[in-house]
Image (cartoon, rainbow, N blue to C red):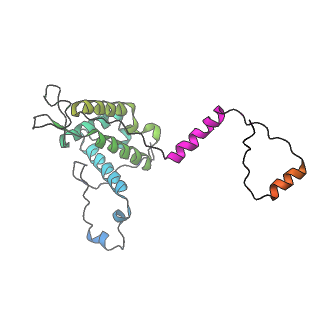
């Protein structure tokens, strides 16, 4: 990962869950359009997350460079973020374990929600490759990180009584009909061959403007 770009020296404040932006300085306000205003909300959050992880590595003891970062360091970072969490996760001895709407407060700890961690890893994974990292060396895509996120999802789902299963998107009726039509056509018997007629009859039928209806005498 020789081409991997290290983090910039911008100092930001943990935790990374804040979505507020920093006021532009005098030098940046002189430009007609600042870079932050042209970026989308996702890009701004991804940049803040990337800088926050860089600050975490610089504060690591001993300091850790990005090129030596592994999935184990990513797990340390995720556990470190739990102290800034705002999601109540009930322990098994809590009477509200598995209760989605607890009727009273409890001393159970606050943690980072699984959805926040999952979205964070997705942004950091993309930022790593955008800064020159190779996909096969991406620490945010390590198997240990995926297993940790799955464990957090399952444990929080049981503790909070909330299902994290993704809802299946309903397809439009027209799309469903188009997908079902090939199977229906295969199930139907083949249509009978059209009866042969002479050219004079065909010519008369083409010139006729009346709607053809089957005769009731045909059995």
| Horizontal relation, residue 125 to residue 213: left or right | left
Queried whether the magenta region covers residue 187, the answer comes back as yes
Q: Which of 111 and 156 is in front in this view?
A: 156
| Horizontal relation, residue 21 to residue 35: left or right | left
Question: Total number of numbered labels?
Answer: 0
Q: Which of 114 and 24 is in front in this view?
A: 114
Say which residue appears at 22% left-offset and 34% top-offset: 160
Relative to residue 2, is residue 76 depicted above or below?
above
Image quadrant for the N terminus? top left
Q: Quadrant of residue 12?
A: bottom left
Q: Which of 116 and 173 is in front in this view?
A: 173
Say which residue appears at 40% left-offset and 46% top-offset: 128
Q: Which of 85 and 51 is in front in this view?
A: 85
Residue 167 location in percent, x, y?
38, 39
Q: Quadrant of residue 151?
A: top left
Relative to residue 74, is residue 123 depicted above or below?
below
The magenta stretch is 164-193
Relative to residue 145, is residue 2 depicted above or below?
below
Queried whether the magenta region covers residue 190, the answer comes back as yes
């Amino acid at each position: 990962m020789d081409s991997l770009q290290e983090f910039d020296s911008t100092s930001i404040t943990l935790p990374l869950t804040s979505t507020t932006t920093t006021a532009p300085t005098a030098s940046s306000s002189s430009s007609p359009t600042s870079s932050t205003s042209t970026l989308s909300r996702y890009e701004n959050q991804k940049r803040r997350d990337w800088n926050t992880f860089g600050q975490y590595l610089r504060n690591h003891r001993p300091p850790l460079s990005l090129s030596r970062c592994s999935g184990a360091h990513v797990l340390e970072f995720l556990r470190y973020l739990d102290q800034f969490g705002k999601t109540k996760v009930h322990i098994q001895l809590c009477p509200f374990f598995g209760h989605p709407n607890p009727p009273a407060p409890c001393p159970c700890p606050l943690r980072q929600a699984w959805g926040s961690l999952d979205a964070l890893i997705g942004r950091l994974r993309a930022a790593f490759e955008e800064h020159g990292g190779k996909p096969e060396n991406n620490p945010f895509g390590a198997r240990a990180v995926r297993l940790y996120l799955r464990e957090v999802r399952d444990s929080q789902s049981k503790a909070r009584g909330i299902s994290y299963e993704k809802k299946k998107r309903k397809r439009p009726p027209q799309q469903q009909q188009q997908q079902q039509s090939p199977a229906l056509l295969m199930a139907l018997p083949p249509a009978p061959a059209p009866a042969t007629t002479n050219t004079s009859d065909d010519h008369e039928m083409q010139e006729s403007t009346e709607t053809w209806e089957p005769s009731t005498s045909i059995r």
